[in-house]
Amino acid sequence: MPAISNKDNVLTYKGSNFLRQRLLLSTLSGKAVRIIEIRQLDHEPGLKEFEVSLIRLLDKVTNGTTVELNETGTSLYYNPGLLIGGSIEHECSLQRGIGYYLEVLMCLGPFCKVPINATLRGITNSPMEISVDHFKSAGLSLLKRFLVVDDGLYFKINKRGMRPLGGGEVTFKCPVRKQLRPIQFMTYGKVKRIRGTVYVCRMSPAFANRMVDTAKGVMLKFLPDVYINTDPYKGKEAGKSTGFGINLVAETNTDVFYSAEQISNVANEGADLSIPEDLGESCANKLLDEIFRGGCVDSAYQYVVALFMALGQKDVSKFVIGPLSEYTITFLQHLREFFGVTFKLDHQIDEDDDDENGVSQGADKVILTCIGIGYTNLNKRVL
């Protein structure tokens, strides 16, 4: 539902959908939000554990944030404080993976007073959101593009943590910037190589080899330059649960990265046991679909591009992306409500994607265009 603004300049929303978007943009804009009727008709109404964990993380990154919840948890008032950053340790909810929280820190990091140095613990690889591998391959490369100089940007997977018990740990450091530069990125290029990582936790390394063989069998039909690394974890570094998965990354000749991942099912959740060969084939096909969608960014990070374009200097930014996801469409609406930024969307048919018979080899693209609002990190002094 669209936001309702009252005389106190508080944006009001109904329901739990896109709660993370709203809290993120509230923190950046300084505008308070009130979210009502959160799962009001559910058997377990109110905020879920992972949403409460997100609010706690935002409270750690800021100073002076006010949070008010009613008794049932179905009504939330969030008034953000100043973005501080600094050293953060956070136990992520096991209802969501670490990637759910990493994306928020990536969006907030450049605008903090002190560079973020965060240690997050929980589930590193979950099918419900992007994994830490996906973040490392596609997310960091995008962040570097907007930061220009990536000094101080650091990410490491210290421990793996599979569902349901987690036990994983990552370290993320992000430098601060006074402003983000406007960007003109229109050429996504051709895929030049494919790399991958296959990981197993507390299981036989033979599972990894089976996934590698199947995934390579699919990808070699598309491109000859394919290399997939195996990464078996044992002991404390393997987390608290058994599991395995595969992450594949395609890199273009213009340094665009597309990523795809498949993760094994949890046995006691009632799903069929995962077969390594099926995971390898499925992940390869997902990557091919991501390449078909194309654009200058992985589809999972379309909304991050829109955010950094909107907050950039007061100049025109243009960026080519693949077909808009539902999440991105909603994010564009929220950007208008929180910052008053509107985007021009142009349909692009790239003839370079046609094969020798004129058959399209990729999805039609969208050109995002906007003028940045000149968002300035007031904490960052210019020497």
Image (cartoon, helix red, strand yellow):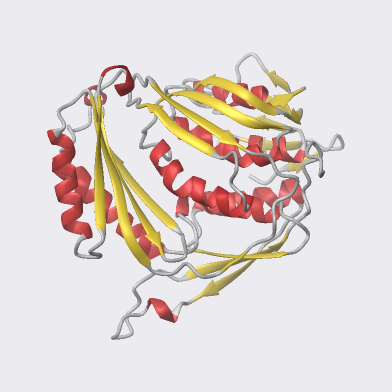
- In this rendering, the answer to whether 118 lies above or below 197 is above
Residue visible at 67% across and 46% down in the picture? 2
Dividing the picture into quarters, in which one does residue 135 lie?
A: top left
* 301 left or right, relative to 234: right
Name the residue at the right extreme.
Answer: 7
- The total of numbered circles placed on residues is 0
Asked whether residue 162 is in view, the answer is: yes
Front residue of 137/355: it is 137
Front residue of 291/224: it is 224
Dividing the picture into quarters, in which one does residue 270 lie?
A: top left
Asked whether residue 74 is in view, the answer is: no
Front residue of 191/287: it is 191
- In this rendering, the answer to whether 72 lies above or below 76 is above
* 324 left or right, relative to 174: left
Q: Quadrant of the N terminus?
A: top right
Residue visible at 23% across and 58% down in the picture? 219
What x and y, as percent, mark residue 354?
36, 80
Front residue of 111/23: it is 111
* 147 left or right, relative to 246: right
What x and y, as percent, mark residue 211?
18, 43
Residue visible at 40% across and 55% down in the picture? 258
Residue visible at 36% across and 33% down in the picture? 125
Q: Quadrant of the C terminus?
A: top right
What x and y, as percent, mark residue 305?
58, 54
Dividing the picture into quarters, in which one does residue 168 lie?
A: top left
What x and y, as percent, mark residue 105?
59, 35
Name the residue at the bottom extreme.
Answer: 357
Name the residue at the top extreme.
Answer: 71
